[in-house]
Amino acid sequence: MEETTRPPCACSAVRAPLLQFRGQQWSPSLLLTLLALAATSAQAQTATETEPVRFTGPLVSASPPLPKGLLNIEPYLINTQTVARYDSQGHRHDVDGVTDNWQISVPVQYGATDRLTLAVTLNAAYAPGRDRQWDLTSGDTRLSASWLLAHGNGPHQPKLTVTAHQNLTTGQHDRLEQRRIPGPTGSGADSTTLALDSQAHFLPRSNLRARAGLAWRLPGAHAGLHGQSGYDTHAGFKGSAELGDAVAANLGAEYSINGNWALASDLVYEYEADTRVRGLAGNDQVDETLPSSWRLSIAPAAEYHWSDNVGMIFGALVSLDSRNSAAIVSPQVAVNMAF
């Protein structure tokens, strides 16, 4: 393993949480070209007042609770690549020669009542192992419960939702020297995140949907550490990491061009406080602090809908600036299915 990285911020209010892996450089121009082609194709069809307004995304912003009895499954295929790293002064340092990795993320939501939605998000990583063979391993699992606090009936149809997320440590975070895949795929901490999300519609046809969200991971979660880990420890170490709090904020919007096509985008800010690592490395006492980090990203995407119950979204999360964090480009595609 060339370098260690901190696990991803567990507070991010994303619909499909991302595992941040290192990878080869990928140009955002390809995504912009695809979005331009999608927009051109969509505009070739003229929307009418009777044409349905359909949405699938955006990629990051969370959705309000589902109607009672509705089941929603949205498998994601995500390729997260690190193209550079930002130091504590904000200086960008390019990285070369690292292998890209893949993640499968499957959020499953069920409307228990018209106000309460229960969800589980399963994650798996597909990456090259030490023998250069690609392997599949599990990531962390997230359990969620969302409650509709308020719902307006006016033309904007505003909704306000509160959500509790619980991270379960089903991924790998330590003993990396013994793993088939040498990098971390989870945080190792059973952390809790609280989120507040809102949604509203605009324009005469209500074909512009806006979302905003704020999530806070509670401080104090602990991860037991043995050997090499995602917390910058090495073989022979035994101790723990105490995570500070973390905050994620996002603004998202979708514009329905016609019954089949829509364009979407998110602006995402993530912050993670200091993490304290304590333990023994052989006979030496270790008490270190991993510095806080933040990242600002944008996530443009396009959507295509076959029907009211099936749609697809494709785009990428692209970091704009950060401190003590990686500069990432994460192209992804998902199919949204409602039953």
Image: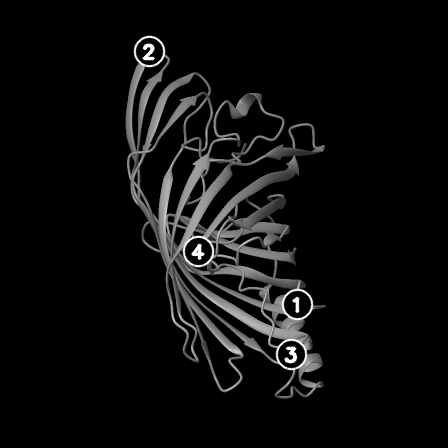
**First along the sequence among labels 1 and 2:** 2
Q: Which residue is mark 1?
A: 308
Q: Which residue is mark 2?
A: 283
* Whole-number angstrom distance, CA of label 4 to CA of label 1: 21 Å
Does residue 6 show up? no
* Neighbour tally class for label 2: few under 14, some 14-19, many 20 plus, Cα within 10 Å: few
Q: Which residue is mark 4?
A: 115
- Locate residue 27 relative to residue 217 in the image: left or right: right
* Whole-number angstrom distance, CA of label 1 to CA of label 3: 20 Å
Pick the front one: 192 or 237: 192
The x, y position of residue 258, in whole percent, is 64, 80
**First along the sequence among labels 1 and 3:** 3
Callout 3: helix, strand or loop?
helix
- Quadrant for residue 270, please give it: bottom left
The x, y position of residue 290, in whole percent, is 32, 37
Whether tag 4 and tag 1 are in contact, CB under 8 A, the answer is no
* Neighbour tally class for label 3: few under 14, some 14-19, many 20 plus, Cα within 10 Å: some
**First along the sequence among labels 4 and 1:** 4
Of the numbered discs in the image, which one, if any, rests on residue 39? 3
Q: Given this view, does label 3 or label 4 mark the residue nearer the observer?
A: 4
Callout 1: helix, strand or loop?
loop
- Quadrant for residue 187, please give it: top left
Whether tag 1 and tag 3 are in contact, CB under 8 A, the answer is no
- Locate residue 266 relative to residue 282 in the image: left or right: right
Q: Amino acid at mark 4?
A: Arg
Whether tag 3 and tag 4 are in contact, CB under 8 A, the answer is no
**First along the sequence among labels 2 and 4:** 4
* Whole-number angstrom distance, CA of label 3 to CA of label 2: 62 Å
Q: Amino acid at mark 2?
A: Asn
* Whole-number angstrom distance, CA of label 2 to CA of label 4: 55 Å
* Whole-number angstrom distance, CA of label 3 to CA of label 4: 35 Å
Q: Quadrant of the C terminus?
A: bottom right
